[in-house]
Image (cartoon, rainbow, N blue to C red):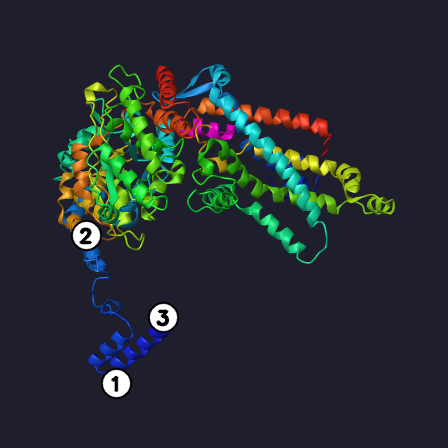
């Protein structure tokens, strides 16, 4: 029966029920024959086998705390009518704030918030122009961890802002932010460059069904990652590759993957003398490993950023990836992919050896779990810094962060308490917006996180020098990995000399 | 100003009231940006101090010693030459084929113009998908014909990446040549061709001795317009390869954009774009003189 006919028939049945021409039992029997579940009749049943939280109920539960909104109303009252502007990358927290949560803040405070969602490089351009002109076009800055050094003097240190007791949110608890993130993302030269806002981080995501079929276990070491990937490639390739990569020449994603390989083999980008050492023995070992691992990747990997990598796993082209954990809720969403419930997560494979922070420079922290987090800070050039500070506290407080995690599709929280929030834990099931990967994300942040160095030249080095040369290497443009890495070393030295 | 004065100006013979708005627009959008660019090329933005610092000719010296600049210039010239020759030859061939009143040809001519209204960035995305190593139609066809190994991604292989980008360029802009040439062919007088046919000239002879010489000015204008555009190629490179693999598809415009907006080297970016402008102006001037283009 066509859908339109079914709806017409249902309408006539409902009409007869309402007019008393049909009993309730007959109505349900006929409606059942029509193939309509009780859920379709609005009786509150869940939508599918994995969706244990009815969406309406979930939305009702996901409301901001009344106490928090009361504080927003009180603290924001003097600034009612102000308009705040924030330029941010399209990340789950920003999208959740923009589309679902900022209305609560605006209604309570009377402060209007305009959030510009842009590609990352455009955010950098906007912030740089704003800083150069000191116009204060943007009241709040979204600061990628690689820009912390550049903008450290252009934003307020939140610890200093908290001293203003009349505007401080009760129980804001700045110590609740994960210490590893505060250290890895927010701190530069003794200043806190905003508070940790989001934390995409590399974790191991793999197809459990494929691993089980081939008798494999989640890789605990880099060697196992390679052998597992090869085993899958041998058994299922080329239709399904062992692992997907993010290896587009000239793109930052290639540098991200490289650091994970480099750190995973005991290497580092810089030594304590601030010299590039990606071309040392450990660096070359990483390159040899990566070159070999690439043989277990799909043919198109040279053209993929993280988006292509995620799509490869989502479409069943690859069985695993060592990449951003925020992809996982997407894989679990049955309306988006056909692999919902088939993927599992694990902490990144252990490094063969790991350099300490003291053995590197510019705050570089080796770890296979490459992190790409960002902070949120109030601009020193803002014309309404107090109103911006009220918004920032609300946007990064535990209550709002829990809502962001639950509504924003299971993005990694930056506060300890959010991981334990019942609303977040309630979503730890297979399905859209799952949070079942968050324990692994939390453990990765605590034990396996790798942070890039902080230096003003890093934007150029990480987004051009390294990925362009690596792309050239993988396209056969160098005679050897040593030649490629030596060339990068020369270029980096030239850049650092200015 | 009174109504009478406005009326007097409006009906006067002076061209200035009508030229002034255009001149104002030119000053705001062309003259000022040009001089600002020249000024910027002798300065550099200092990220640490957030200020522009006078650097004299440093940016020009850096340009001279910059291997990436010379590489991108080479890629731009290669792109320019290959695309222009193919678009010219293909455009003329298709125009000659369509220069007839056969059923359906009118619709064909209309369809041809459709590629021109697609934004180049969208065309770039289309060809990115068409050349995808997993599911791309172009990749599949080349594999099927045995011209490409299955493990060779077109846009990620040094030897094929530029050709992959050129494919999008040629697909989108050959119709531009076709339309210009068709307009030229339609305006040619019929008499010389009728006389040649009576004298027993072959089609090729008529093309070489009549069509080409009479079309020379149209061809010259098409080459000039397309050539200037080709030298500024950016969209396809940005969407399809980001200049890669390595620096294989790094064009001058892409390099200037990257230096300006990704690395905030505004002075050096201005120097690169000025260099591009100078090269285009010199080439265009030489071509105009050689081809005796008259406007």
Where is mark 2, residue-wise? A429
Q: Is residue B5 above or below residue B250?
A: below
Q: Secondary structure at mark 3?
A: helix
Question: Magenta span covers which residues?
Answer: B248-263
Are dots 2 and 3 in contact, CB under 8 Å? no
| Neighbourhood count class around disc 3 (C-alpha, 10 Å): few under 14, some 14–19, many 20 upward | few
Separation of marks 2 and 3 at Cα, in angstroms? 31 Å
Residue most extreme to the bottom: A21
Picture disc at residue A3: 3
x then y, percent, for residue B223: 65, 35
Query: Is A333 on the left-hand or right-hand side of B96?
Result: left
Cα distance, mark 1 to mark 3? 24 Å
Q: Please tell me whether residue B250 belongs to the stretch shown in magenta.
A: yes
Instruction: Tell which subunit mark 2 falls on.
Output: A
Q: Nearer the viewer, mark 1 or mark 3?
A: 3
Above or below, comparing residue A417 to residue B71 in the picture: below
Q: Chain of mark 1?
A: A
């Amino acid at each position: 029966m066509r859908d339109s006919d079914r709806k017409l028939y249902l309408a006539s049945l409902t009409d007869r029920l309402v007019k008393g021409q049909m009993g309730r039992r007959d109505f349900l029997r006929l409606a059942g024959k029509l193939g309509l579940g009780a859920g379709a009749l609005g009786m509150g049943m869940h939508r599918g086998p994995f969706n244990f939280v009815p969406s309406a109920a979930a939305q009702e539960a996901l409301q901001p705390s009344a106490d928090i909104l009361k504080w927003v109303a009180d603290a924001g009252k003097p600034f009612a009518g102000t308009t705040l502007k924030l330029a941010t990358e399209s990340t789950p927290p920003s999208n959740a704030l923009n589309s679902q949560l900022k209305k609560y803040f605006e209604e309570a405070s009377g402060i209007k918030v305009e959030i510009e969602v842009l590609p990352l490089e455009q955010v950098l351009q906007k912030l740089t122009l704003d800083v150069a002109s000191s116009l204060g076009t943007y009241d709040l800055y979204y600061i990628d961890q690689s820009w912390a050094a550049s903008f450290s003097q252009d934003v307020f240190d939140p610890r200093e802002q908290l001293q203003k007791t009349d505007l401080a949110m009760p129980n804001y608890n700045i110590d609740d932010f994960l210490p590893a993130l505060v250290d890895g993302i927010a701190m530069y030269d003794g200043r806190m460059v905003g508070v940790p806002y989001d934390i995409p981080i590399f974790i191991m995501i793999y197809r459990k069904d494929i691993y089980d079929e081939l008798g494999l276990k989640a890789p605990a070491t880099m060697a196992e990652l390679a052998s597992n990937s090869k085993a899958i490639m041998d058994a299922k390739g080329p239709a399904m590759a062992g692992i997907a990569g993010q290896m587009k020449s000239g793109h930052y994603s290639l540098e991200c993957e490289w650091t994970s390989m480099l750190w995973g083999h005991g290497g580092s980008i810089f030594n304590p003398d601030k010299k590039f050492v990606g071309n040392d023995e450990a660096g070359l070992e990483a390159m040899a490993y990566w070159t070999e691992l690439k043989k277990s990747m799909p043919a198109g990997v040279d053209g993929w950023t993280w988006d292509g990598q995620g799509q490869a796993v989502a479409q069943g082209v690859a069985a695993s990836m060592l990449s951003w954990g925020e992809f996982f809720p997407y894989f679990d969403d049955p309306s988006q992919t056909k692999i919902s419930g088939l993927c599992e997560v694990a902490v990144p494979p252990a490094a063969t050896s790991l350099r300490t922070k003291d053995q590197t420079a510019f705050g570089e922290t080796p770890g296979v779990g490459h992190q790409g987090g960002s902070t949120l800070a109030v601009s020193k050039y803002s014309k309404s810094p107090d109103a911006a500070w009220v918004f920032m506290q609300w946007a990064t407080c535990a209550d709002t962060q829990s809502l962001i995690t639950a509504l924003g599709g299971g993005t990694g929280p930056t506060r300890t308490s959010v991981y334990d929030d019942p609303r977040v834990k309630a979503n730890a099931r297979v399905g859209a917006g799952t949070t079942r990967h968050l324990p692994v994300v939390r453990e990765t942040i605590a034990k396996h996180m790798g942070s890039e160095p902080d230096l003003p030249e890093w934007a150029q080095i990480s987004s051009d020098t390294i990925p362009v040369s690596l792309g050239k290497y993988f396209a056969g443009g160098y005679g050897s990995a040593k030649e490629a890495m030596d060339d990068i070393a020369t270029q980096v030295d030239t850049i650092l000399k200015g | 100003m009174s109504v009478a004065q406005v009326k007097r100006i409006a009906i006067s013979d002076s061209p200035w009231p009508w030229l002034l708005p255009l001149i104002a627009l030119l000053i705001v959008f062309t003259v000022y940006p040009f001089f600002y660019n020249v000024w910027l090329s002798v300065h550099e933005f200092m990220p640490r101090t957030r200020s522009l610092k006078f650097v004299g000719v440093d940016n020009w010296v850096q340009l001279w010693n910059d291997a990436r600049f010379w590489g991108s210039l080479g890629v731009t010239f290669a792109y320019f030459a290959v695309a222009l020759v193919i678009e010219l030859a293909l455009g003329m061939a298709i125009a000659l084929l369509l220069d007839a009143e056969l059923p359906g040809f009118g619709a064909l001519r209309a369809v041809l113009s459709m590629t021109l209204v697609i934004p180049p960035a969208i065309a770039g995305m289309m060809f990115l998908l068409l050349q995808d190593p997993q599911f791309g139609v172009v990749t599949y066809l080349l594999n099927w014909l045995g011209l490409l190994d299955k493990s060779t991604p077109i846009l990620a292989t040094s030897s094929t990446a530029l050709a992959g980008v050129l494919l999008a360029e040629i697909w989108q802009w050959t119709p531009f040549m076709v339309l210009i040439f068709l307009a030229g062919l339609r305006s040619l007088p019929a008499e010389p061709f009728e006389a040649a046919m009576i004298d027993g000239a072959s089609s090729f002879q008529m093309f070489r001795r009549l069509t080409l010489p009479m079309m020379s000015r149209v061809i010259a204008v098409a080459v000039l317009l397309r050539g200037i555009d080709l030298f500024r190629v950016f969209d396809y490179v940005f969407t399809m390869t980001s200049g890669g693999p390595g620096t294989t598809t790094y064009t001058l415009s892409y390099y200037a954009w990257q230096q300006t907006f990704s690395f905030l080297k505004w002075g050096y970016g201005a120097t690169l774009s000025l260099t591009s402008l100078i090269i285009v102006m010199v080439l265009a001037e030489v071509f105009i003189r050689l081809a005796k283009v008259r406007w």
